[in-house]
Amino acid sequence: MTTIPLSAQAENPQLRPLNILHDLPAVADLVETCFADTMDADGRRYIQQMRSAGRDNQFLRWATSAVETASMPLSGYVWEDQGRIVGNVSLIPYRAAGRRYYLIANVAVRPDHRRQGLGRSLTLAAMQHARARNADEIWLHVRDDNPGAIALYQGLGFREKLRRTAWQAKIDHNARYETGGISLLAHYSNEWALQEGWLRRLYPDRMTWYQPVPWKTLRPGLGPSLYRFFVDIGSRHWTAYAGGKLFGTLTWQPVSGSADRLWAAVPPEGAGESLTALLVHVRRTLHWRQALGLDFPAGEYAADIAAAGFHPFRTLIWMQVVEQF
């Protein structure tokens, strides 16, 4: 069993809590330096927002009182070397179903300070912070192509729980796919129980604290329809049938300032052609939008999603602390 020292900060005087009033610009520079090669448009927007927040006195006053309640990276730790921030870790609190979660994020160390134990000490400090605040669960995610970080987190007691791939595509009016015997309908399925079961498998409950499924947007019926109307959620839905049998559904939700969100519901197997047809149809139909994003279990229907013109941007391994310390 891993042994965690009582205070990572006491052992490392260069390690200190993040000062939200002064550190944000330097942390933004550090995160950008460390992740520039793998950062998407959302990541670059996040860096810009961090820099803007560091100059917004009104935001900073609010943030100092919301550090442990807002689901934002307002707390964490930094590592200083001769007055310069060279390492960072962020903590993002969540509450769901009466449980308190902490997500460890933005573990970043300048290239010239790596392999000195800074990443481990920063992560330990974040874990201790969460434990001291009675966290029920501590999570983090790491790219699947970062074996060094994966090994580090495994050594600290984290174990893989989920592996998800983020797929992206551009709108393409000319996208085509031979649907064969597949019928695409622009309305809800009347087989909601089946669709709900597929959704719960693909978007499991254990991730709803971070990625809540918008059930009121996805469910059919008068009540959900009225809700969507009054809150002005412009979602659209398509279903795929073959031989009179439902093989998949796809829901589109617009997202301001980012790739629009797609929610797919398909059975564990046998729906590859239907999923491809649905995704191609969305790319061709939403001519007034720009980009689409689909989060999906890694490895499932990968060839069929790629056949629809989507490319895998990244695959994240979601890890949770499982030992008791």
Image: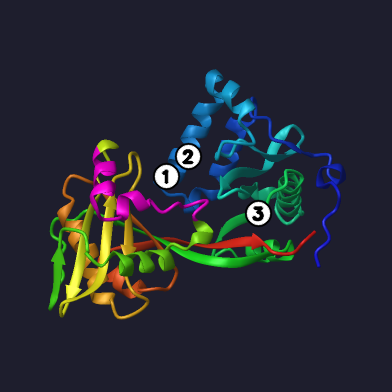
Q: Is residue 39 left or right of residue 66?
A: left
Please state, as top left, top right, bottom left or bottom right, where the C terminus lies in the image: bottom right
Residue sitting farthest toward the front: 222
Q: Please give the range of residues in magenta.
A: 208-229
Q: Which residue is mark 1?
A: 42
| Quarter holding residue 144 | bottom right
Dot 3 or dot 1: first in sequence order is 1
Residue 300, position as x, y percentages in the image: 40, 73
Secondary structure category for the residue under label 3: strand
The type of residue carrying mark 3 is: Ile
Give the CA distance from mark 3 to mark 1.
Answer: 24 Å
Give the CA distance from mark 2 to mark 3.
Answer: 23 Å
| Quarter holding residue 44 | top left
Q: Which residue is mark 2?
A: 46
Q: Nearer the viewer, residue 93 or 312?
A: 93
Q: Are marks 2 and 1 in contact (CB under 8 Å)?
A: yes
Q: Residues within 10 Å of mark 2 (few under 14, many from 20)?
A: some
The type of residue carrying mark 1 is: Asp
Task: Confirm whether residue 275 shows in the render.
Answer: yes
The number of callouts visible is: 3
Q: What's the residue at 48%, 53% (across, down)?
A: 38
Secondary structure category for the residue under label 2: helix
Dot 2 or dot 3: first in sequence order is 2
